[in-house]
Amino acid sequence: MDRLTVVDEIFLRTHRGMGTPIALQGLWRTPDTMDPALLQQIHHELSRGQLGRRVVRARVPGARRAWQPTVRAHPLDYLAADAHRALSEGEILPWADTLGADLDPEFFPGWRLSAAPLADGGTVVALTCSHALADARGLIHAVALALRSLNGTPAGHASIAVASTARHQHRERSADESRSDWADARAQWATVLGGTARALRNGVPRPPETIAPPADPGRTVRSSLLAFDAGQWDSVATEAGGTPNSLFIYLVANILWENGFGDDTITASLPVDTRDEPRVDNDLAVTEIRIDRADTPETIRVKARDAYLRRMSAPAGLPEEILQVLPDRLAYKLSKGAGERDILCSNIGTMPDALSTVGPHECTRVAARAIHPGITDFPRTRLSGYLSRLADTYTLALVSLDTHESLTAAADRALSKAGLSADTW
């Protein structure tokens, strides 16, 4: 039985008001109108794929929640093509920001496919999913599988066959679920008790200080999508002695400073993809670096290289599984603020070639980011950046969780100082 990981459960709790609400979103744009029938085909492929999972509670205390295959899905959310309803350039992100409701995979389908016509005659498509289901790379892989299957690529059909087989196998072993829960509970408690005993013998380290965000009723969410010529981006990075990744981190930090952040040091949270093969799940670790105003893409490259060799540890040196045997609210209290720093820099990497077309349509722009549906309790993080590449274009998605209204102007100033120019997404 496929069980939820510690990271899965941290994100699951955010649906219940325990932590910053977060959903992942992939966006892609075509220059022409997509047929609703094609969108329905994509929706069908996704519903049969690896996003089609729901959370099932364990019957035994200490056993982890489990993933169970399901074909239940939110219906295709299609804004019908109408001259009065087509989205203008400035309406794309406000529309996309509204798509994260009712994605708790225990009580609702955990994903939603949406599409809208654009005033320029094109189409924008959004796939939004609970972060409990997948991280950004997992979401992108789910889209790639669906599009490959749509185009008749064998790899896509193989993935669907695997999902179908998994559902069949689940039905066969449903009578053994209780036995499986008991076995999982014994393994979990053995890990927790053994790890806690070792931690006590070695001396439990002082937990890292969690810096609570100052009470600030003026904070709100603002988003931006910027597209860059990959040749220019890579050239600027090389000339500065850095890499495309260190230039990305440098830019996000400097955009925050340009947006009014007062401290001379910014702490950056850096997610790290830990997959050994593509999977639709959460498979990541987090590390951090401190960035000073004097840092450059070159010095950040060195700091990041060293940071990727270490990871943020479990609370107070205890085994991370302790978060899965405690009641949700106690687990949340113990892990609250984990991974939150002044900025988040998530380098999603190069998109699969399968995302460059949707059926007969060329994708001129593709982006991946997080959204924060219904957020009221803001985290320490002030600015999140998500970098991805498709063909010859980098896309930088920015999500500001700050009081300032000048995200666009701040980004323009930081880009100008770095010698970069951005295109409209």
Image (cartoon, grey):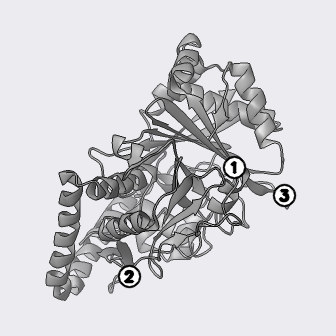
- Specify the quadrant of the image occupied by residue 217: bottom right
| Residue 140 in view in this figure | yes
Circle nearer the N terminus (2, 1): 2
Q: Secondary structure at mark 3?
A: loop
Circle nearer the N terminus (3, 1): 1
Q: Position of residue 83 (x, y in %)?
A: 68, 63
How packed mark 1 is, by other alpha carbons closer than 10 Å (few <14, some 14-19, many 20 or more), is: few
Q: Residue at x 36, y 44 (%)?
A: 274
Q: Residue at x 58, y 70 (%)?
A: 80
- Is residue 29 or residue 297 the one in the foreground? 29
Q: Secondary structure at mark 1?
A: helix
- Is residue 95 or residue 6 the one in the foreground? 95
Q: Residue at x 29, y 52 (%)?
A: 148
- Specify the quadrant of the image occupied by residue 98: bottom right
Whether residues under marks 2 and 1 lie with C-beta atoms below 8 angstroms apart, the answer is: no
Q: Residue at x 58, y 17 (%)?
A: 236
Q: Is residue 337 left or right of residue 220?
A: left
Q: Position of residue 325 (x, y in %)?
A: 41, 73
Quick check: 94 above or below 71?
above
Real-space CA distance between mark 3 and mark 1, rounded to the nearest whole angstrom: 31 Å
Task: Check disc 3 and give the amino acid type.
Answer: Asp
